[in-house]
Image (cartoon, rainbow, N blue to C red):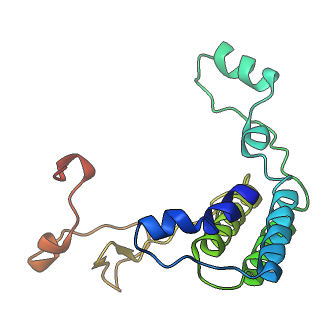
Amino acid sequence: MDHVLGAAGDARRHRDLGEESPTLSPRTIELLRDISAQILEAQRPIRVLRVLSWDDGVERAFFAGKGRELPRPEYRVPANIAEVGLRFRELKAAVPGHNAIESFLRDTCDAYATAARMLAAVGNRVETLHRRAFGALALPADLPPGAWCWLEGPQVVEAPLPLSERAP
């Protein structure tokens, strides 16, 4: 954290750029160091690749079957991963102010909270899917589940193009 806090106190760099030098009180610096240390500790259970990787047996079975059947790995998601996500929301709320360092710490908390939320969802199954709209295009209210309909008139203009047909 010192390398980030040191940059905020580099008055020459800001003076050369014609900017006002940001100043942080010693109390704020200590608070940000403490929050930074808490972020470092809280992120320890978030090991995306370790959680999502297949063990050797799953990999061997998948390739031995020439990929004809989807693998059935057992994911090892930490039991407390939901609490980890909540902890990052708490840490984000504890970051005061709106300077670059504080914004960076809040963004870091958001990123780790998102990773924790995604890990908590690992292994969930989609039981049903209900599509009510596609982009700005809303489906007719009387369209039964599983049915389809032709697009007409302005709907055709509103429908998004397939990715392969979009301009770069």
Count of numbered marks: 0
Residue 125, placed above or below residue 70: below
Horizontal relation, residue 7 to residue 91: left or right: left
Residue 155, picture quadrant:
bottom left
- Please say whether residue 3 is visible from this viewpoint: yes
Q: Is residue 140 above or below residue 12?
A: below
Residue 20 position within the rendered picture, expressed as x and y whole percent measured from the top left: 49, 79
At which x and y percent is residue 34?
Answer: 86, 70
> Toward the viewer: 63 or 15?
15
- Tell whether 140 sits left or right of 156: right
Q: Specify the quadrant that holds the N terminus.
A: bottom right
Q: Nearer the viewer, residue 141 or 2?
A: 2
Residue 54 screen position, x and y as percent: 75, 31
- Residue at x-position 43% and y-position 65%: 16
Q: Is the residue 64 above or below the residue 10 in the image?
A: above
Q: Residue at x 12, y 74 (%)?
A: 152
Extreme residue in the right direction: 79
Q: Is residue 81 visible?
A: no
Closest to the observer: 85 or 8?
A: 8
Residue at the (72%, 22%) spot, across then down = 59
- Residue extending farthest left: 153
Q: Quadrant of residue 156?
A: bottom left
Residue 62 place in picture, x, y as percent: 67, 22
User: What residue do we see at 65% from left, 75% from top?
Assistant: 102
